[in-house]
């Protein structure tokens, strides 16, 4: 019998999961959940039905798992006794939890904790199956041990199981990003933090572009720890090496995006522009507008006055429909001022990170992950008043 890779890893390193598998339960591991299909039960007319048990996996490391608690989720109606009455010793209630599998839709949660609790997964599942399936086994000679091989190993861009999403029960929201191919143009302070946030977002692919070198000052305004051998490498190499162990479909290239970079952006569905030169920004804007790629541009304007730093963080969203009009409003600087060469370009890590936070939140609002009551396309956060205004 073959099984999917995630399940095989857990079977080989967790005796309780192995016991469930070898006994014949139809197991799969999907999106941070242990799923047991083919669970027979009776409905109120004592007809035989088939449901599924879903339970969160808590990963101790990448191969060892434990239970979160004694509760389970269930796909199906409330199981009934032989006389059609509801089984009473199942606490919990109606709930909703959308998983990646199209055949698995959680409808309720159950709670039945023995005085001593459950020692492991095997005890827990056996206990619930006895309660849920007992009447169906007696009346219809049903059998929950189908030995069925379930191809539940959905493709994931992450190289570790995304238990954050399963613990928060937001799989139905995270799936909104699954077809997005994101470009991050410029990996300076704000771009580096944006890349870090995107790495942990289940988008289909991430493309990064920056030709500059990684020096000590970059380490002071970028996420992650500094390895001595990174100094003097290209930024693209540093970030590729830093994150490729976390997810797949990550390609960071040592190049600038120019007016003729169409091929580099083929397939991109959304872009973040994180450059500090007006002329470069204009060239990138024109390319994205021509290619009809929506994008967010970020920028910071910080100044030192009276021995304190003040300024503004900007986040501007250019949709496919309004990009040209917004560009003409000059909300983002598209020229290099003559005295820019003499200007002290202040960059501070927490402000770079905050600028990236506002940008990624806006992106997730656009995709329906976060609520957006205002639908601002242009937002300014002022340090002095610690407030955000938009239009």
Image (spheres, helix red, strand yellow):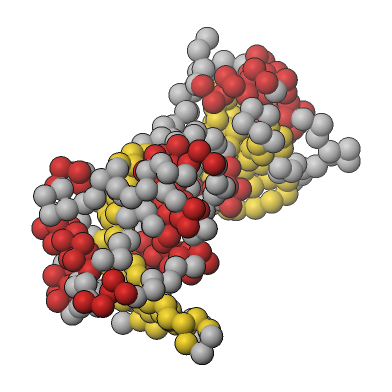
Query: Going 55% across and 36% down the picture, which residue do you hit?
Result: 161
Q: Residue furthest bottom?
A: 306
Image quarter where the C terminus lies is bottom left
- Left or right of 185 on screen, residue 157: right
Residue 352 percent location from the top left of the image: 45, 65
Tell how many labels.
0
Q: Say whether residue 180 is left or right of residue 351.
A: left
Residue at the (33%, 39%) spot, across then down = 251
Residue beneath the point at 57% across and 24% down: 7
Question: Considering depth in this image, is 68 or 62 the residue closer to the camera?
Answer: 62
Identify which residue is drawn at 20% across, 43% down. Answer: 264
Q: In x, y percent, where is residue 232? A: 42, 44
Q: Which of the 4 image quadrants contains residue 388?
A: bottom left
Q: Nearer the viewer, residue 369 or 203?
A: 203
Q: Is residue 273 above or below residue 108?
A: below
Vertical comparison of 274 with 203: above or below: below
x then y, percent, for residue 216: 49, 53
Q: Quadrant of residue 287?
A: bottom left
The answer to whether 213 appears left or right of 145 in the picture is left
Q: Is residue 2 visible?
A: yes
**Location of residue 268 in the rendering, given as x and y in whole percent from the top left corner:** 24, 48
Q: Nearer the viewer, residue 117 or 60?
A: 60
- Which residue is most to the right? 115
Q: Could you tell me if residue 132 is visible in this image?
A: no
Which residue appears farthest toward the top when viewing the image?
1
Q: Quadrant of residue 119?
A: top right
Q: Is residue 150 above or below residue 301?
A: above
């Amino acid at each position: 019998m073959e099984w999917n890779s995630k399940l095989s890893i857990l079977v080989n390193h967790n005796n309780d999961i192995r016991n469930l598998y070898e006994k014949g339960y139809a197991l799969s591991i999907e999106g941070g959940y242990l799923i047991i299909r083919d669970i027979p039960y009776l409905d109120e007319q004592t007809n035989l039905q088939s449901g599924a048990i879903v339970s969160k996996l808590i990963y101790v490391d990448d191969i060892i798992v434990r239970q979160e608690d004694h509760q389970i989720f269930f796909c199906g109606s409330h199981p009934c006794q032989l006389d059609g009455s509801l089984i009473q010793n199942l606490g919990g209630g109606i709930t909703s939890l959308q998983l990646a599998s199209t055949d698995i839709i959680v409808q309720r949660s159950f709670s039945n904790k023995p005085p001593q609790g459950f020692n492991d997964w095997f005890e827990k599942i056996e206990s619930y199956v006895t309660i849920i399936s007992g009447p169906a086994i007696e009346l219809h000679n049903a059998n929950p041990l189908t030995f069925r091989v379930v191809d539940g190993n959905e493709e994931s861009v992450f190289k570790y199981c995304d238990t954050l999403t399963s613990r928060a029960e937001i799989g139905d929201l995270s799936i909104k990003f699954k077809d997005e191919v994101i470009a991050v143009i410029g990996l300076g302070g704000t771009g580096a933090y944006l890349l870090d946030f995107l790495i942990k977002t289940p988008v289909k692919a991430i493309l990064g572009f920056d030709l500059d070198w990684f020096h000590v000052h970059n380490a002071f305004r970028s996420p992650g720890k500094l390895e001595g051998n990174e100094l003097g490498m290209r930024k693209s190499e540093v970030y590729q090496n830093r994150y490729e162990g976390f997810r797949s479909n990550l390609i960071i290239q040592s190049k600038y995006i120019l007016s003729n970079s169409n091929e580099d952006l083929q397939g991109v569905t959304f872009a973040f522009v994180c450059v500090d030169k007006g002329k470069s920004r204009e060239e990138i804007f024109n390319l994205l507008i021509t290619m009809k790629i929506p994008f967010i541009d970020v920028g910071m304007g910080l100044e030192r006055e009276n021995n304190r730093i003040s300024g503004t963080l900007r986040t501007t969203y250019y949709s496919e429909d309004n990009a040209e009009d917004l560009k003409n409003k000059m909300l983002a600087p598209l020229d290099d001022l003559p005295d820019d060469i003499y200007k002290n370009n202040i960059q501070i890590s927490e402000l770079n990170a905050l600028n990236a936070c506002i940008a990624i939140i806006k992106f997730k609002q656009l995709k329906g992950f976060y609520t957006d009551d205002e639908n601002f396309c242009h937002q300014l956060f002022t340090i002095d008043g610690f407030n955000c205004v938009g239009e």
